[in-house]
Image (cartoon, helix red, strand yellow):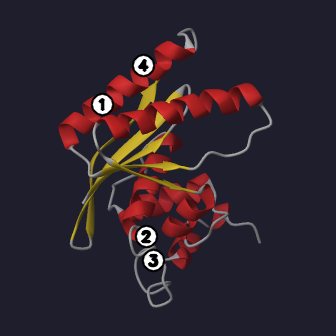
Amino acid sequence: MVVLGVDPGSLNTGYGVIRQDTGTFSVLVCGVIRLHSRQSHAERIGEIYRELAAVIDEYRPDRVVLETAFLSRNVQSALKLGQVRGAVIALAMNWNLGLREYAPREVKSAVTGRGAASKEQVAYMVTKMLSLAEPPKPFDVTDALAIAMCDLLRGDSRESFFSNERAGSGGNSWNQFIAASPHKVIR
């Protein structure tokens, strides 16, 4: 199974392609599409579409996954984000790919075991779960990888990586994060 996770944004759109083979995960590619604020919004959407189409063409994912839209007090920002999401959805449909969406809390819960985890905690767990040497930068990339991991971990079974029998028992536990990052924990 190959999944393309996308963290859409009107200036920075993160993406990550992860392959799952019998319980092991590997990152095929990840990155961020950085756009200039001087470009029109339509030009930015077009660039996001073209760059993600090139990723799809090269890595042939089985599906695309996104976070669900969130409520924003800034109507213009919400509209622009919705348009970017629409372009990603149209891209998936044009390539006849499956499409799934997950709430931000569900993504965080799937990869950290905690729905209110910080971006640093998500980045740490994504790095550990994917056996990366260091967390990809910026957070748009780790968020995209987390979205893809959420789908692969929950997928059809909707079962979390942090099921009762696995939580705290291995190298990807919440306790390991706390031990490695005591300065990030508020007590």
**Of 162 and 158, the residue lying toward us:** 158
Q: Residues within 10 Å of mark 2 (few under 14, many from 20)?
A: some
Give the CA separation, mark 1 to mark 4.
10 Å
Q: Quadrant of the N terminus?
A: bottom left
**Residue that badge 2 annotates:** 154
Q: Say which mark, if any, is on residue 159.
A: 3
In percent of width and height, residue 48 lies at 42, 26
Give the CA separation, mark 3 to mark 4.
36 Å
Q: Looking at this rendering, what residue extends furthest in the right direction? A: 73
Asked if the residue under mark 3 is in contact with the one under mark 2, i.e. CB atoms within 8 Å, the reply is: yes
**Of 129 and 72, the residue lying toward us:** 72
Q: Say which mark, if any, is on residue 70.
A: none
Give the CA separation, mark 1 to mark 3.
30 Å
In percent of width and height, residue 162 lies at 48, 78
In percent of width and height, residue 165 lies at 45, 91
- Dot placed on the residue nearer the N-terminal end, 2 or 4: 4
Residue 9 higher or lower than 50, as above or below: below
SS at badge 1 = helix
Residue 177 higher or lower than 102, as above or below: below
| 187 relative to 43 in the view: left or right | right
**Residue that badge 1 annotates:** 53
SS at badge 3 = loop
SS at badge 4 = helix
The amino acid beneath tag 2 is Arg
Residue 38 higher or lower than 49, as above or below: above
- Dot placed on the residue nearer the N-terminal end, 2 or 3: 2
Residue name at image x 68 percent, y 33 percent: 78
- Dot placed on the residue nearer the N-terminal end, 3 or 4: 4
Q: Looking at this rendering, what residue extends furthest in the bottom direction? A: 165
